[in-house]
Image: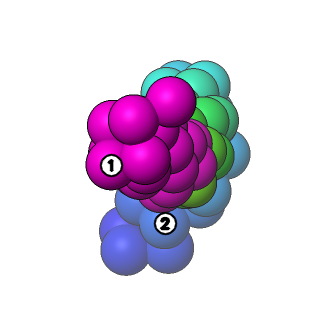
Amino acid sequence: MLQSIVNRMWRDERGQDLVEYALIVAAVGLALITTVNQLSTAVVSLYSSITQGLTSIGATGQ
């Protein structure tokens, strides 16, 4: 009895597609999180550079 249940569960592939899609979504989500973190660091650095440049222009009077 137990062996037949295990064999039936082993051959059942109904949930396989759902698991594969979930893994793909997880991988894409991880890639997006990494990209957004790197992009936000770059934007903060650019903003800081621009504000320092504007401050130095205002300080020198040019």
Q: Residue 38's spot in the image, x, y percent?
A: 56, 54
Q: Which mark is residue 59?
A: 1
Sequence order check: which comes first, mark 1 or mark 2?
A: 2
Q: According to the image, label 2 marks what residue?
A: 6
**Position above or below: 49 against 13:** below
- Which region shows up in magenta? 39-62
Determine the CA span between mark 1 and mark 2.
77 Å
Magenta region, mostly helix, strand or loop?
A: helix
Foreground residue among 52 and 18? 52
Left or right of 5? Residue 58 is left
The residue furthest front is 61
The residue furthest bottom is 2
Q: Secondary structure at mark 1?
A: helix
**Position above or below: 14 against 46:** above
Q: Residue 6's spot in the image, x, y percent?
A: 48, 66
Inspect the image, locate mark 2, and give the three-letter code of the amino acid beneath it: Val
Left or right of 28? Residue 5 is left
The residue lying at 50 percent from left, 30 percent from top is 62
Of tags 1 and 2, the one toward the viewer is 1
The residue lying at 33 percent from left, 48 percent from top is 59
Foreground residue among 33 and 39? 39
The residue lying at 37 percent from left, 68 percent from top is 1
Whether 52 is among the magenta residues is yes
The answer to which quarter of the image holds residue 61 is top left
Inspect the image, locate mark 1, and give the three-letter code of the amino acid beneath it: Ala
